[in-house]
Image: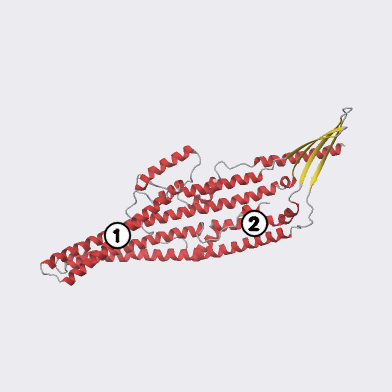
Amino acid sequence: MSARRLSLSRLAAACATVALLAGCASVSPDGLRGAVQSHTASRLPQGSQLPPTDATDATAAQDRIAQWLQQPLNADNAVRIALLNNPGLRARLAQLGVEDAQRVQLLTLPNPTLSLSRMLSPGERELERQLSFGLVDLITLPWRTRWQGMVMEQATLATAQDVLVLAADTRRAWLRAVAARQQLQARERMHEAAEAGAELARRMARVGNFSRLQQARELGIQQETAAQLARARLAATAEHEQLARLMGLWGRGMDFQLPEQLPPIPASVAALRSGDDAEATALRERLDLRALRSDLEHLAERRGWSRLGAMFGDIGLGYSRKTATDRATGDSNVTRGWSLDAPLPLFDWGGAASARARAELQRSAALLQQGAIQARAEARSSWMRYRTAWDLAYQQQSEVLPLRRFIQDETMLRYNGMFVSVWELLAEARGSAQAVATATEAQRDFWLAETDLQLALSGTSAGAPAALSMNEANP
């Protein structure tokens, strides 16, 4: 009898320990934003933060945004504002909090079931009490805790990828908006020169010193530059709107100022010496590959449980106490006992569940291989675009623009000496403005290529294969 009591005490102690472990699972106070921040901190501008959950911190964040908007907005501050203020990112982080709450709910043991019954007969009254709970949920709690941790790690990595994509999109929008302003200024100078030429042509034609054909040519140039100016104004407005949208700004917040020029290109290319270096960095650092590896590891661990889980996933343990009372004498007889409910594997031997786990593992391995191949290709092509864009931008800055300035200065000198006509001077003014616009495009393309390269090396890409949904993998 004492041995039986000792065994029951040990069982009760084990159940209490597991129940205590289940009670330790709790929802993250910040909705796992700290975990996302740890994955992205080194890949974002220094001091970047995610939207806070506390109302006081949210007010302080809006104050910082207002301060950044009071001065010409640089690319890093634009990214910081987008991370704090973009509604889509806030929704994605809130969804991560939902998934964290679901994790805790899945790790919380189901409430035990209490059954009460009262039976009457002519000579006896019976009162039965039964307490039962799922034994499998109790036994598998340590494994489920580990599995759910993997689930949330992958969800965190997916959210971190969304953060990096938003940061890259915002940086691209800032570059395009600033470049559009520069090109608008160049188009305005071209149109001013064309207007001057058209007006001069009208006057000279009026006094008979210009043919109608020559006047028509100058008027055609004016109309062409006017159309280019209209398109440049539209592009500048559209890029400004796109940047404001990514930063979550509207109303008065859209009146922010941008710098007059793009940042100068660096004196040399990045530290990566070749596409091989870019490939190795991407395979080592990319978050989407890390998420795919995590998914593969999770499915490999879960495969052994799949067959047993399908066969014996509903085992239940119960304790009952029945009191029978003689209605004539009032004597009571108490009986106690344990019950075990286990399914009999007569029809489902777990073969389908095992085949599904094997297929899921094969799919995850194939997706990881596909992701690695795509990451390799994207890293190498992004590095080549980056290197080519730097060569073109450097050529524009170091050779083309100085040459155009020399031609413009020499044309002005010859015009002052009356060696060239005013039409050559105006044509050179338009050519110089076009050269500035072309150099701006090359400078913009370099910084866009640099942004794409950084995302391809350490984050993800729009075409990367999606990771498996690990929420389906719960035992």
Q: In x, y percent, where is residue 289?
A: 56, 58
Front residue of 244/270: it is: 244
Q: In x, y percent, where is residue 54?
A: 50, 39
Q: Quadrant of residue 236?
A: bottom left
Q: Residues within 10 Å of mark 2 (few under 14, many from 20)?
A: some
> Label 1 is placed on what type of residue?
Ala
Residue at image coords 67%, 49%: 144
Seen as rendered, the residue at the extreme front is 122
* Secondary element at image label 1: helix
Q: Nearer the viewer, mark 2 or mark 1?
A: 1
Which of the two discs, 2 and 1, labels the residue nearer the N terminus?
A: 1
Seen as rendered, the residue at the extreme right is 329
Front residue of 325/253: it is: 325
* Secondary element at image label 2: helix
Distance Cα–Cα, label 2 vs label 1? 56 Å
Q: In x, y percent, where is residue 294?
A: 61, 55
Q: Is residue 467 visible?
A: yes
Residue 230 is labelled as 1
On screen, residue 329 versus residue 99, left or right, reads: right
Q: Is residue 177 visible?
A: no
> Label 2 is placed on what type of residue?
Glu
Query: Are the two marked residues, 2 and 1, in contact with CB atoms closer than 8 angstroms?
Result: no
Which residue is denoted by mark 2 in the rendering?
A: 297
Residue at image coords 44%, 39%: 60
Q: In x, y percent, where is residue 133?
A: 74, 42
Front residue of 130/386: it is: 130
Q: Quadrant of the N terminus?
A: top right
On screen, residue 256 versus residue 28, left or right, reads: left
